[in-house]
Amino acid sequence: MHNFIRLLKLCKPHAGMLLLGAFLASLTVLANVGLLAISGWFLAAMAAAGIAGVQMNYFTPAGVIRFLAIVRTASRYGERMITHNATFLLLSEFRVKMFRTLSQLNNVDLAMSRSSDLFNRLQNDVDALDKFYLNVLLPIIVAIISIPIVMAFMAMYSAEVALVCFISLMIIGVLLPAILSRKLHRQADAETQISAELRSELADTLKGARELAVYQAQEAQLTHCDLLSKQYNSQLYNRHKAVANSNGLSTLVIQLTMLASVFMIIPLVAMGTMKNVELAMLALFVLASFETVLTLPTAFIELPLTLSAAKRLFALEDKHSSHLSKQQNCLAHQSAIGLELAAVNYQYAGAKNKALNNINFVITPGSKVALVGASGSGKTTLVNLLTGLWPKQSGSLKFITDQGTFELESMTAATRFKQLTIVAQQHHIFDGTLRENLRYAAPEATDEMLIEACEQAELGSWLNNLKTGLNTRLGTAGRKLSHGQSRRIAIAQALLREGNLIVLDEPTESLDNHTKQKLLTTLEKIWADKTMLTITHDPEMLSRVDKVIWLEQGQVRALASHAELVANEADYVELITRF
């Protein structure tokens, strides 16, 4: 029931169109019922008039019949158009929400999920929800609207017949669906799970066809897929069997009800309480009234499958940390945050040695720290763990704030990147204008803010010389820029953000000495209250930081000031001068 309510909440943006579709569907059902009942009366009346040799006014009932036929056709057309359009809108709503959920999950959740399973949820589970409105919600709404109206008109002719008909409607529309729904509830979960597993296994089989051939494991894998396929077909057979049984029972109840109503009306006609022509009308009225509930058994058969698919989708959304809002509120009021790494290890698949081996250090809020090490020492691995681009294997990575510490692993990507400002060594320039590239970092920034960021990044004179200014196109991957200009655009983007922990990867690379000195002075002034972690081997930058973390072969070799390392470590001096 909880997932049903959550699905209803997702329908809220399109509630007007959904209700309009339900109104047109109800109008179609009522027009069908009225058309069949009046047609029965008209045919019986014409026959009775012919036998008695009297005249009757056939223009009025003929006009009513024609009117109801037009109403039925027009409302059916409108209902199909509105309800299907509403279904497509709901599907887009579900799919966008699902994609948004995937994009907000932290990378550990993503890394621990099979890509084929995530795709299955995004594709097939969302597609399963297209039945929620048309096959589940719409029949329920139509029944709620139509049954009271039909019963009210039927009771005007015979309260007893209306009561019998109402009981039969409840059997078909409530009792039978409830039994089917209860019976198929567990089976629906199994069917959805087996379907997802089968698709995942088939995707893995195709993707790993070469490896299966090399290790001669195709037969075992195909046997496993065949077993899953048989299990899935068995689940489908049980469901379709239930649908067939439901349709058969519904038909039996309808025929018995109509027969019972005829036997109840005959004495009334014999006593003169009811006109003979009303016998045919009321019998057909009873028969047509079941159109109000005829699709409810199927709706309740589809409901468990829809809720099972919704459960899988909502399971991803529920992976968000329960204390996420607390983290966001605490982190939002920080001007700087620190970083604590404890017993962090990381080893790439197939590698003999660890890329990071028992890394322990603390960066206090507001401090300026440099990360130094030869190629392969673990600097990039450490930054990727910090950003969440790679999942943590062991150890602890925490943000330090005035109100406590927060595990990075428990944060969503959006929360984590809101606190981080990163200037990567490999920075991509998109094929667009300078304004568009800068606004990736700050979509709401004004042109004045963009120009100021360019000036702070030592791009002011270059920008002033551009004929079209911020409207200048930078070309694919920034091919119209020098490497130094590309680096400074990345720094300008970083200046537009409001992150509390700044991560810079060789920020002064490809810059001349004069530009570098001015840029470093500007960055120190602007980010004076921020925490900065800089990967660099530039002696000028190293002399400006509070501490240096020296990595070697995945371990912290030393943690000291630049001056202390220069005075005591010859290998350190050789490292920074070599670069």
Image (cartoon, rainbow, N blue to C red):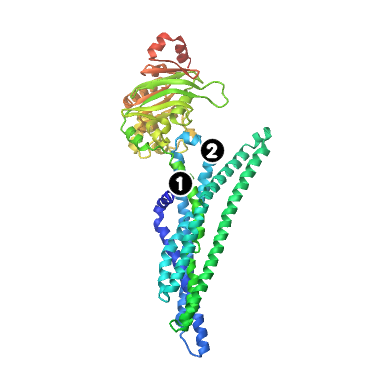
* Residue 158 as seen in the image, left or right of residue 250: left
Tell me what residue is drawn at x 39 percent, y 14 percent. Answer: 562
Using the image, tell me which numbered label, if any, was put on residue 96: 1
Say if residue 39 shows up in the picture: no
The furthest residue to the bottom: 53
Q: Residue 205 location in percent, x, y?
A: 62, 39
Say if residue 95 shows up in the picture: yes
> Taking 272 as reference, is 17 above or below it?
above
Count of marks, rendered view? 2
Using a 10 Å C-alpha cutoff, classify the residue at mark 1 as few (fewer than 14 neighbours), some (14 to 19) or many (20 or more).
Answer: few
Between 5 and 164, the one nearer to me in the picture: 164
Secondary structure of the residue carrying tag 2 is loop
Secondary structure of the residue carrying tag 1 is helix
- The amino acid beneath tag 1 is Val
Single out the mark in the foreground, 2 or 1.
2
Q: Residue 286 location in percent, x, y?
A: 48, 72
> Taking 142 as reference, is 337 above or below it?
above
**Mark closest to the chain's N terminus, 2 or 1:** 1
Using a 10 Å C-alpha cutoff, classify the residue at mark 2 as few (fewer than 14 neighbours), some (14 to 19) or many (20 or more).
Answer: few
Tell me what residue is drawn at x 40 percent, y 75 percent. Answer: 156
Q: Residue 132 location in percent, x, y?
A: 47, 54
- The Cα–Cα distance between marks 2 and 1, rounded to whole angstroms, is 20 Å
- The amino acid beneath tag 2 is Arg
Using the image, tell me which numbered label, if any, was put on residue 109: none
Tell me what residue is drawn at x 43 percent, y 75 percent. Answer: 158
Asked if the residues shown at circle 2 and circle 1 are in contact, with their CB atoms under 8 angstroms apart, the answer is no
> Taking 355 as reference, is 453 above or below it?
below
Q: Residue 141 location in percent, x, y?
A: 43, 61
In the picture of the structure, the residue carrying the numbered disc 2 is: 114
